[in-house]
Image (cartoon, helix red, strand yellow):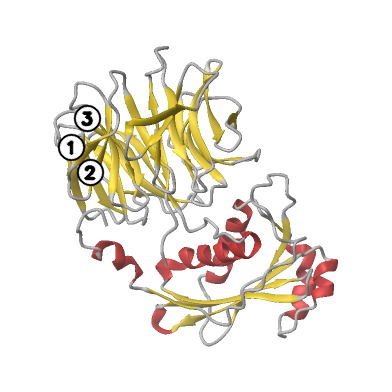
């Protein structure tokens, strides 16, 4: 933890959930089914999600099973790895197997299903929640792959289903899915900007701050418990952190002038930030002992730091090239300007907002393309950049999903700003917010279970 702070606010939401893992048989799929996430053209896996079967005493009068199945199907569809089959395709086969425990792998293959998910659930007495039993089968290789049992309160139904969806993605790719992740962003309100949270699937929009002032640049702590941002609440752009329940906050830095563009180091021992204490915007490290270490020493503006996943380097924006326009650079995370500084953006008169990918091999950034802004991605292996967004409106302020497959960004359309998501290498674009006043998205890390 960067600062010694109570964790009760974060942990209270988990008091109501108990996760019981059972018969967790982790069987790897055959090569023809397993996907390489780096290959954008890989064919999706066809998947049959049967109706959730109610077991035990009582009844499901409010349709929990139907709601949970809908959440699961949407999660797996949004992963862009699966193609759920339409219910009429396998309805008769499902009805035949409903009362038995056997799985007719041959028949499932004949209806076009590569994988099959079957789920049973029951109610806990006195309305205290449900118990879900999920099973995943590989129809191609004729095997049971995974079983999970979750017990949760009604308030955590979506979280439980998200968690199983992420397990299914892990079976396919070897890497945890992102259904359980969140995005923080800013929304304009009454002349100011407040910090919000929203789930990956667009549900559970929550307002974290009610400062009635301008807030800037929200960024996640690596453990997913805190969001650090710049706030003008005390009539100075101070560095503040708030927990994800919106209940606890601390001021981390309050020097006169800018305390902006924060980025937490992967080990959570320091924060890179921009200070204007030297009559110019320079990048500093705020260490755990509250001491400051200056990294950049240039008469031009340096801003927007982002860490490499190993914590050894920082990419940032600077107009030090002498062209009067910002470009993207990489420096050593300890030596800064006293070490080697490398420019990586070329071919555009304006580049800003770098974001280092979780895998460490790419950096996304905002780039001027013609008369608009688009998101470009620099490959540190090939040393080449590629524009990854297109279409009407300007795309800016990229942030990576924790699995490195998606980018969230702000897009200007019809005079308003909203948050959008795009898979790297994909053509589909999904709108996440609809207020027309959304800015500065930042994707959460994986949350610890």
Q: Position of residue 200 (x, y in %)?
A: 49, 51
Is any part of residue 332 visible from this angle? Answer: yes
Residue occupying the far top of the picture: 323
Placement of 339 over or under 178, stated as above or below: above
The residue carrying mark 1 is 233
Which structural element holds mark 3?
Answer: loop
The residue carrying mark 3 is 258
Q: Which mark lies nearer to you, 2 or 1?
A: 2
Residue at image position (22%, 50%) is 288
Q: Position of residue 351 (x, y in %)?
A: 46, 24
* 1 or 3: tag closer to the N-terminus: 1
Which structural element holds mark 1?
Answer: loop
- Quadrant in the picture for the N terminus: bottom left
Q: Position of residue 309 (x, y in %)?
A: 44, 48
Q: Residues within 10 Å of mark 3 (few under 14, many from 20)?
A: many
Q: Residues within 10 Å of mark 2 (few under 14, many from 20)?
A: many
The residue carrying mark 2 is 240
Compute the Cα span from label 3 to label 2.
12 Å
Q: Position of residue 32 (x, y in %)?
A: 77, 60
Residue at image position (17%, 43%) is 291
Compute the Cα span from label 2 to label 1.
10 Å
Is there a contact, CB below 8 Å, between mark 2 and mark 1? yes
* Front one among 219 and 348: 348
Q: Which mark lies nearer to you, 1 or 3?
A: 3
- Quadrant in the picture for the C terminus: bottom left
Is there a contact, CB below 8 Å, between mark 3 and mark 2? no
* Front one among 211 and 41: 41
């Amino acid at each position: 933890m960067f600062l010694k702070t109570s964790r009760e606010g974060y942990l209270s939401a988990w008091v109501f959930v108990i996760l019981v893992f059972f018969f967790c048989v982790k069987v790897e799929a055959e090569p023809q089914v397993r996907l390489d996430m780096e290959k954008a053209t890989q064919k999706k896996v066809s998947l049959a999600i049967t109706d959730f079967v109610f077991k035990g005493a009582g009844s499901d009068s409010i349709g929990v099973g139907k709601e949970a199945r809908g959440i699961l199907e949407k999660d797996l569809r949004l992963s862009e790895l699966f193609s759920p089959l339409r219910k009429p395709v396998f309805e008769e086969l499902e009805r035949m197997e409903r009362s038995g425990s056997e799985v007719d792998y041959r028949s499932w293959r004949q209806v076009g299903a590569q994988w099959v998910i079957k789920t049973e659930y029951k109610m806990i007495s006195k309305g205290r929640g449900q118990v879900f039993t999920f099973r995943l089968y590989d129809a191609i290789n004729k095997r049971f792959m995974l079983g999970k049992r979750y017990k949760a309160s009604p308030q955590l139904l979506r979280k439980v289903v998200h968690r199983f969806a992420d397990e299914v993605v892990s079976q396919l790719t070897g890497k945890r899915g992102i259904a359980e992740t969140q995005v923080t962003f800013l929304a304009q309100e009454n002349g100011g900007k407040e910090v919000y949270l929203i789930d990956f699937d667009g549900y559970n929009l929550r307002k974290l701050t009610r400062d009635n002032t301008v807030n800037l640049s929200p960024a996640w702590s690596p453990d997913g418990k805190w969001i650090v941002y710049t706030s003008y609440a005390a009539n100075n752009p101070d560095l503040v952190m708030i927990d994800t329940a919106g209940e606890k906050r601390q001021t981390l830095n309050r020097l006169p002038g800018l305390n902006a563009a924060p980025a937490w180091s992967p080990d959570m021992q320091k924060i890179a930030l921009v200070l204007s204490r030297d009559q110019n915007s320079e990048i500093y490290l705020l260490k755990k002992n509250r001491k400051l270490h200056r990294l950049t020493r240039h008469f031009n503006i340096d801003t927007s730091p982002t860490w490499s996943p190993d914590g050894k380097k920082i990419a940032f924006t600077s107009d030090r090239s002498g062209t009067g326009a910002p470009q993207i650079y990489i420096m050593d995370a300890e030596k800064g300007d006293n070490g080697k500084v490398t420019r990586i953006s070329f071919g555009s008169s304006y580049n800003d907002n770098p974001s280092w990918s979780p895998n460490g091999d790419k950096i996304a950034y905002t780039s001027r393309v013609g008369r608009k802004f688009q998101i470009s991605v620099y490959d540190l292996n090939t040393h080449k950049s590629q524009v990854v967004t297109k279409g009407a409106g300007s795309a800016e302020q990229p942030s990576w999903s924790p699995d490195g497959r998606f980018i969230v960004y702000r897009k200007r359309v019809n005079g308003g700003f909203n948050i959008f998501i795009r898979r790297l290498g994909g053509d589909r674009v999904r709108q996440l917010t609809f207020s027309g006043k959304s800015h500065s998205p930042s994707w959460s890390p994986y949350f610890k279970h």
